[in-house]
């Protein structure tokens, strides 16, 4: 994989975009315009070029432009491993998204063989102070960037857990009903746990010795039972031993779905949850950059990076530092902001798109340097 980037992006009836076509090169893309103009919708469209439901985790029917609700399509030319691929996503009549690669229908997971897309959006700013569920999603998204098969494992695990929880709520006590489900939970759960640990180690290595203006974070995977069994056999035995307790609770109380990600501001030794808002944001940016560096080292090319409204939370010096790191990494980063001046430090290292709203429809114009 080399030179990963989009050179064309086309949207039809997607969110606020009636019909939008964009041609870009491999440089960063600075997108500016007023709030509500449709900037984030462009980033969401790009996020679909990786496995999963995109950066908003939205259902296909929620992405359609209204009030027409005719269905939507997002397509583009994705350059990966020295080749250009035509990738299209579409949904009709509220049906699930369909993906095609080079004219052939493909599973969403097949996108993981072509691209990696990372993102940081404002809703993630509360990562360190919200519930553990949000941090697990954040960790699993990073893990998925290293191991695309992690998505299928997570789906298989969730399905088995739902079935086991149904037995628990129905007060089923026959061990034979649980054996096969717990075997599946143990197999997939142990691999999920190992994938997460591998991803955290890759992030640690990417942070160690990196020349960065952003604070590094020490990350630790914890579990509410103090320690999660880390082998398939141990997890299967733990699940069997926990049946009585789980039956009282009506749900499965042990497994990787109960894990939490704990972050610490390395230089200060302060838990991320106790850091200032600015420090928490800087730690998130640092982790996204570390994730991108780790992928570049592993795959030979950096991922596509989406940074929504990131510049607004940084002072001029740190904005310039962020742009320098992105350009040094060689990533095609799609970044949004309300004003063109927020991207002044990029100079001619980036291309620029101006987005405006006209009667509820987004309009996109390619501009020169700063407009």
Image (cartoon, rainbow, N blue to C red):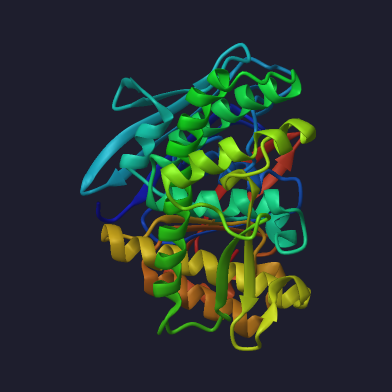
Q: Where is residue 279 shown, x and y percent of the image?
A: 70, 77
Q: Where is residue 158 shown, x and y percent of the image?
A: 57, 32
Answer with left or right where residue 145 lies relative to residue 335: left
Q: Quadrant of residue 45?
A: top right
Is residue 354 visible in the rendered image? The answer is no
- In the depicted view, which residue is nearer to us: 74 or 360? 74
- In the depicted view, which residue is nearer to us: 99 or 187? 187
- In the depicted view, which residue is nearer to us: 90 or 195? 195
Look at 56% across and 69% down and name the residue there.
219
Is residue 56 visible in the rendered image? The answer is yes
Q: Quadrant of residue 358?
A: top right
Instruction: Name the outermost residue toward the left.
Output: 82
Mark count: 0
Q: Is residue 196 above or below residue 70?
A: below
Q: Where is residue 289 shown, x and y percent of the image?
A: 48, 68
Look at 57% across and 23% down and name the residue there.
175
Q: Is residue 85 above or below residue 291?
A: above
Q: Where is residue 247 shown, x and y percent of the image?
A: 73, 30
Q: Is residue 71 above or below residue 102?
A: above
Instruction: Name the outermost residue toward the top.
Output: 93
Answer with left or right where residue 321 lies relative to residue 39: left
Look at 59% across and 83% down and name the residue there.
266
Check the picture and name the quadrant holding the C terminus: bottom right
Q: Is residue 19 above or below residue 215?
A: above
Look at 56% across and 24% down and name the residue there.
178
């Amino acid at each position: 994989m080399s030179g990963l980037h989009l050179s064309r992006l086309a949207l039809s009836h997607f969110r606020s975009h009636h019909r939008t076509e964009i041609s870009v090169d491999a440089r960063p893309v600075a997108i500016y315009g007023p709030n509500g103009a449709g900037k984030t919708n462009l980033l969401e469209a790009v996020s679909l070029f990786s496995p999963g439901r995109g950066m908003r985790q939205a259902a296909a029917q929620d992405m359609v432009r209204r009030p027409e609700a005719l269905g939507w399509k997002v397509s583009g030319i994705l350059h990966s491993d020295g080749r250009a691929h035509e990738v299209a996503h579409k949904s009709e009549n509220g049906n699930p998204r369909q993906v095609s690669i080079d004219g052939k229908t493909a599973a969403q997971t097949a996108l993981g063989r072509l691209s990696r897309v990372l993102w940081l959006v404002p809703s993630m700013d509360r990562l360190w102070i919200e519930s553990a569920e949000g941090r697990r999603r954040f960790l699993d998204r990073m893990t998925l960037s290293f191991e695309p098969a992690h998505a299928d494992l997570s789906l298989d695990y969730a399905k088995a857990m739902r079935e086991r929880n149904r037995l628990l709520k129905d007060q089923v006590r026959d061990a034979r009903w649980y054996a096969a489900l717990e075997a599946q939970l143990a197999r997939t759960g142990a691999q999920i746990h190992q994938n997460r640990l591998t991803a955290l180690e890759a992030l640690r290595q990417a942070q160690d010795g990196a020349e960065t203006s952003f604070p590094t974070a020490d990350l630790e995977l914890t579990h509410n039972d103090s320690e999660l069994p880390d082998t398939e056999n141990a997890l299967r035995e733990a699940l069997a031993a926990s049946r009585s307790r789980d039956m009282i609770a009506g749900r499965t109380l042990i497994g990787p779905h109960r894990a939490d990600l704990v972050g610490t501001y390395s230089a200060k030794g302060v838990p991320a949850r106790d850091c200032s808002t600015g420090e928490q944001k800087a730690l998130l940016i640092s982790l996204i950059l570390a994730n991108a560096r780790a992928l570049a080292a592993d795959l030979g090319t950096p991922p596509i990076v989406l940074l929504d409204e990131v510049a607004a939370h940084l002072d001029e010096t740190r904005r310039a530092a962020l742009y320098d790191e992105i350009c040094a990494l060689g990533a095609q980063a799609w970044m949004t902001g309300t004003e063109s001046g927020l991207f002044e430090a990029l100079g001619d290292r980036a291309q620029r798109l101006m987005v405006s709203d006209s009667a509820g429809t987004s309009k996109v114009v390619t501009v020169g340097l700063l407009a």
